[in-house]
Image (spheres, rainbow, N blue to C red):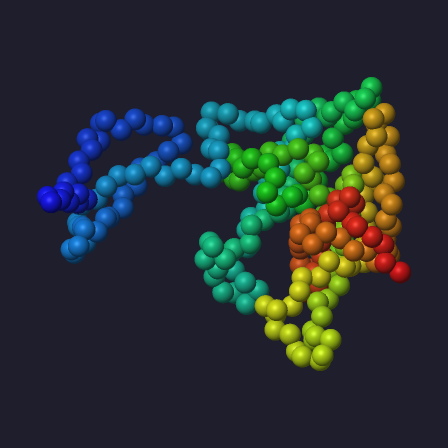
Amino acid sequence: MATAQLTASSIKVPARSLTSFDGLRPSSVKFASVGGAPSQRSFRRLVVKAATVVAPKYTSIKPLGDRVLVKIKTVEEKTDGGILLPSTAQTKPQAGEVVAVGEGKTVGKAKLDISVKPGTQVIYSKYAGTELEFNGANHLILREDDVVGILETDEIKDLKPLNDRALIKVAEAEETTAGGLLLTEASKEKPSIGMVIAVGPGPLDEEGNRKPLSIAPGNTVMYSKYAGNDFKGSDGTNYIALRASEVMAVLS
């Protein structure tokens, strides 16, 4: 039976036939020939950036409704010891400065303003919002409800939770089994118990009034295993910021 062999060198696409798009840039990549040495022929491909690029002709962004525009804090490129981190090892930032806010939202008959103001340093949910590249810096536009809390220092323990959020200091994982065997880091079970450090003012009811949370600072609580956003303090202490509804019980 006759067979046909398709090699990289047999593919030819006229450059003029490729439609150009704003925000996409061409780059080259080399392909290896099938069953032989690498081909020296270069092909052009399109690279799409993860963030939406706002053209320089636009000089301002005004969020609408309950949305907030945040300038993302620059990711750390080095460890404390000065070791340069590759992009895959850099921690995705979850902090930034509020640049602009929307006009607020209506709850029932009440018109509520955004609870954070421009210039406020905030922490937000890890996968919230839409990333923008604006004025040469990375920004995020997200809903106010995705803002976890206000952080005026570099210590996560000083976080002031918003709305129905709570900050919990995570209990240390058990070092040994019930039989006394020492556990490795990989085999330690992720703890789901901790002490409440701070709580938000509570969620809004249908009339726009705050409903106090059922947990308070000092409570030892059990929470859903994969809830919230994890943070690590400068001293290595683990914290988690989550919604009060993700707390399952108060322990005593």
Residue situated furthest left in the rendering: 2
Which is more toward the observer, 66 or 227? Answer: 227
Q: Is residue 19 above or below residue 117?
A: above
- Please state the horizontal and vertical placement of residue 56, each as a whole percent of the image: 46, 29
Q: Which quadrant of the figure has residue 37?
A: bottom left
Give how far across and how far down residue 215 sits, in percent: 86, 49
Could you tell me which residue is drawn at 76 percent across and 53 percent down?
223
The relative height of residue 10 versus residue 237 in the rendered view (above or below) is above
Residue 70 seen in render: yes
Q: Where does the image place residue 161, in percent across and percent down from the top left?
A: 77, 45
Assign the N terminus to one quadrant of the image: top left
Vertical placement of residue 109 versus 241, above or below? above
In the image, what residue occupies the spot 73% across and 75% down? 178
Q: How many labels does the image show?
A: 0
Residue 193 occupies which quadrant of the picture? bottom right
Q: Residue at x 78, y 44 (%)?
A: 245
Residue 9 shows in this picture:
no
Looking at the image, the residue that sits furthest to the bottom is 180
- Say left or right for 76 vs 143: left
Quadrant location, the C terminus: bottom right
Is 28 displayed left or right of 231 in the figure?
left
- The front one of 154 and 38 is 38
9 sits to left or right of 24: left
Q: Which of 7 and 136 is in front in this view?
A: 7
Q: Where is residue 121 in the image (x, y as percent from the top left)?
A: 69, 43
Q: Residue at x 66, y 30 (%)?
A: 67
Q: In this view, does 68 lie above or below 252?
A: above
Q: Which residue lies furthest to the top in this view?
A: 109
